Amino acid sequence: MRRANCPSMIQPARRCDMKTKDIPEDATFDEYNNAAGGWGSVKALGSILQQEHVIASGTRILMHQNKPEGFACVSCSWAKPADPHLFEFCENGAKATAWEITRKRATAAFFAQHTVTEMEAWNDLELESSGRVTEPMKYDAASDRYLPVSWSEAFDDIAAQLRAMDPKKVVFYASGRASLETSYLYQLMARMYGTNNLPDSSNMCHESTSVALPQTIGVPVGTVTLDDFGQTDCILFFGHNTGTNAPRMLHPLEEVRKRGVPVITFNPLRERGLERFVNPQSPKEMVTPAHTDISTQYLQIKIGGDSAAAIGMAKRILERDDKARQEGLPRLLDLAFIEEHTSGFEQFADAVRAAPWDELERHAGVSRAELELAADTYAGAGRAMLMYGMGVTQHREAVRTIHMLTNLLLMRGNIGKPGAGICPIRGHSNVQGQRTVGITEKPELVPNDKLRALYHFEPPMEKGLNTVEACEKIRDGELSAFFMLGGNFVRAIPDHGVMEAAWRKLPLTVQVVTHFNRSCVIHGQTSYVLPCLGRIEIDRQRGGEQAVSVEDSTGCMHGSRGRAEPASPHLLSEPAIVAELAKRLLPFNPQVDWDGWVGDYARIRDAIEATYPDIFRDFNARMWNPGGFARPLAARERQWKTPNGRANFMTPDGFDPDPDMPGDAPEVLRLMTTRGDSQFNTTVYSLDDRFRGVWGTRRVLLMNLRDLQQHGLAAGDFVCAETVSADGVERRVPHLRVEPFDIPVGCVMGYFPELNRLIPLFHHARGSKVPAAKSVPIRLIPELREPSLS
Ligand SMILES: Nc1nc2c(c(=O)[nH]1)N[C@H]1C(S)=C(S)[C@@H](COP(=O)(O)OP(=O)(O)OC[C@H]3O[C@@H](n4cnc5c(=O)[nH]c(N)nc54)[C@H](O)[C@@H]3O)O[C@H]1N2
Ligand SMILES: Nc1nc2c(c(=O)[nH]1)N[C@H]1C(S)=C(S)[C@@H](COP(=O)(O)OP(=O)(O)OC[C@H]3O[C@@H](n4cnc5c(=O)[nH]c(N)nc54)[C@H](O)[C@@H]3O)O[C@H]1N2
Ligand SMILES: [Mo]
């Protein structure tokens, strides 16, 4: 591309003296013209099985994925149908499986070869490519290496250190992968120890949902189940990259589309999976050029434009409804529903009527005509569902946006009837379930009476720390220990520059993991890495082979039985790790039979049922129901567990999606940090992002051609990205290649976690404290090229 010489060109605030070097030059960019799924998926599946050396075993194991008596996929949390396909897994689920059952091993010999300082220079892919950790390890400062340690020594020391600490200064984090059984034991241990410091990955993910929905419809989770797909007349789809992050959902979407049902998508990027899909399981589609068009209307809104888009649609519906009323025609609003079930409608409607169209268009980044068309399609549908992902939840005003999306549904009575509802698409395979069984920092969400009665202890009633609050305390040197049940916390959180430095000062860090990752490299003063069985592995305990259970995005609980031989004979299961620590940490309590629980997980499920009888009735029997069993959800029955007992319309208190974004500075761009096709969160399988045509690099910023030209940049140039913030902290990521992309003007896309250094810790959602990873104000500083590279 030629360097444009544009008169209105933005002059960089200052030049960067940084020179671009050490950049692998094998990165390529193209336009991906194929559909999602199809032969591209089959090819990708073959290469990951080969990469992890598990072609034969992987293929055998995959046949059990998401099947009755098989294992629940460790990748996304999408629903598992009662009548699974022959291959009830997607390309990315298969990648996650291959990664877990890999033949690569990070043994004691591996750790003897590499100092931790040396591994600090490794990227996420290089770190986790070391394979499965095979035995417990402890950091040794003298040799700067992780050395093997026995399980009992590790548990004794961790317990002794924790006992000497103030429980309020200890955090028990969980990533959303651990089973219901592990999660229940984990929260119980933390509470008996004396803390509600139980943040989980949901604090970086759908906590905006867990805050917003109880206020509007009185439930913390979505109301849609798989059955609703068969009965819906319209789907509104906000801020989710389905082809990559929940590909199995493309099957019900495909079925919906085959019935001619409209799907209206709101996303700054034209995500391939939401445009075209070839079902790899359909022989006909695989051998013909056939594909299914998923979206019938695609609104390429600006980053953060969702509230304005929803209000614009609501405005159109009100305008048409007002007219219908005057003319005595059928109304667009579901007046009976609004009257009988809701509160706050008039105030909401007044605010929407008063919202100026030009403001809405400016914030949404799409035209009034586009919003009106979307509204008309929606209003023409009897039953509609609304789905959304991180494009909605990871914003400063995410809670307000979810309120606005819910308003849109309530206007037409689209909650609590078949084929209708709201569907937050959760991330981790059991992130919703962990919250259900008590992993939360909010004591009011816990059945404390039940815990008291069952275990004869006084649960702590003081609010615990969520993810951002825990980070603030670590930054300020106020915490003593951080225990991680899964996850790669240090890498997943914002503000790497500030947080990595602070993390090293923590007296104790403990990580229960399958793979060595950056949070093991950036460690506390005493640091343990405790390797556990993965969910795909056979879990043998005293009472025989054990099964676990998870809750999917649609509130259905499923059993899961591991099928692969464990990666090492020295691994412990997650319930065993929690129980062994709890036994040493807590005073003896005859009400709590840690050993009995670990010997037979069915007894943990009995305890879960005793604690949550409404949700988990007949748990042990029903967990094997085909399709799982659904938790009761009041909103589905049009019962509203809100403070006022009604479904609540929420009045918008503004349209601006991001108070941190300087409105009058044209050089400031709005950055979304998002996932590529070859990663599961911070686990990076390869450097490619097939659907976006990015190959061989993750150090890239994709931007509108006009922005490139305005910045005097050409495709392939390198820049340093710098956060615009007033707190005086310099946040920069150098050596990023810029490429033109189909994205609205002013918006930029880049990858998580490489760009997390740019997100200030204070830049989080009002109300839910989810880091606002999708709207970071940045400016670009051009880099000089090394003569050899130019
Ligand atoms: N293969 C794979 N599967 C996964 C994961 C993974 O890493 N890999 N991670 C799991 C987890 S924990 C989670 S939380 C989910 C995440 O799944 P997603 O919710 O899809 O998360 P992201 O990959 O961050 O993609 C965000 C999407 O929102 C869009 N977007 C960004 N900003 C906006 C905005 O302002 N408005 C709108 N309307 N759209 C916007 C982006 O273009 C992108 O399509 O996936 C889960 N499944
Ligand atoms: N900028 C930006 N930041 C983000 C996001 C974003 O979109 N943008 N998304 C946020 C979201 S939604 C999330 S959920 C977080 C998640 O971010 P992460 O913490 O990265 O998520 P995980 O996939 O849980 O963590 C990966 C690690 O889990 C360990 N692991 C894998 N399987 C198991 C197991 O069975 N048991 C145990 N104990 N450990 C296991 C492996 O060692 C692996 O290194 O990142 C958040 N951070
Ligand atoms: Mo997530």
Image (cartoon, rainbow, N blue to C red):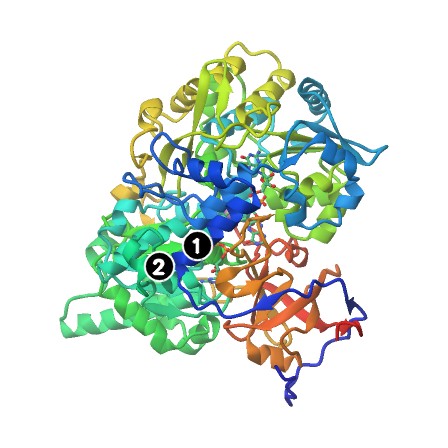
Q: Position of residue 448 (x, y in %)?
A: 47, 26
Q: Quadrant of residue 155?
A: top right
Image point 39% across, 40% down: which residue? Answer: 552
- 401 is higher (above) or lower (below) than 462: below
Q: Nearer the viewer, residue 750 or 72?
A: 72
Q: Position of residue 231 (x, y in %)?
A: 22, 52
Number of numbered markers: 2
Q: Nearer the viewer, residue 148 or 219?
A: 148
* The C terminus sits in image quarter: bottom right
The single residue placed furthest to the left in the displayed view is: 328
Q: Which mark is residue 605?
A: none
- 109 is higher (above) or lower (below) than 324: above
- 598 is higher (above) or lower (below) than 80: above
Q: Position of residue 611 (x, y in %)?
A: 41, 23
Task: Classify residue 620 as left or right of residue 440.
Answer: left
Residue type highlighted by circle 1: Ser
Tell me whether circle 2 and circle 1 mark residues in contact (CB < 8 Å). Answer: no
Q: Position of residue 513 (x, y in %)?
A: 61, 34
Q: CA distance from mark 2 to mark 1?
A: 10 Å
- 761 is higher (above) or lower (below) than 776: above
Residue type highlighted by circle 2: Val
Image point 46% across, 52% down: which residue? Answer: 245
Q: Quadrant of residue 334?
A: bottom left
Label 1 packing within 10 angstroms: few (<14), some (14-19), many (20+): some
The single residue placed furthest to the top in the displayed view is: 590
In this figure, which residue is indicated by the disc labeled 2? Answer: 278
* The N terminus sits in image quarter: bottom right
Q: Which mark is residue 41?
A: 1
Secondary structure beneath dot 1 equals helix
Image point 31% across, 35% down: which residue? Answer: 632
Label 2 packing within 10 angstroms: few (<14), some (14-19), many (20+): many
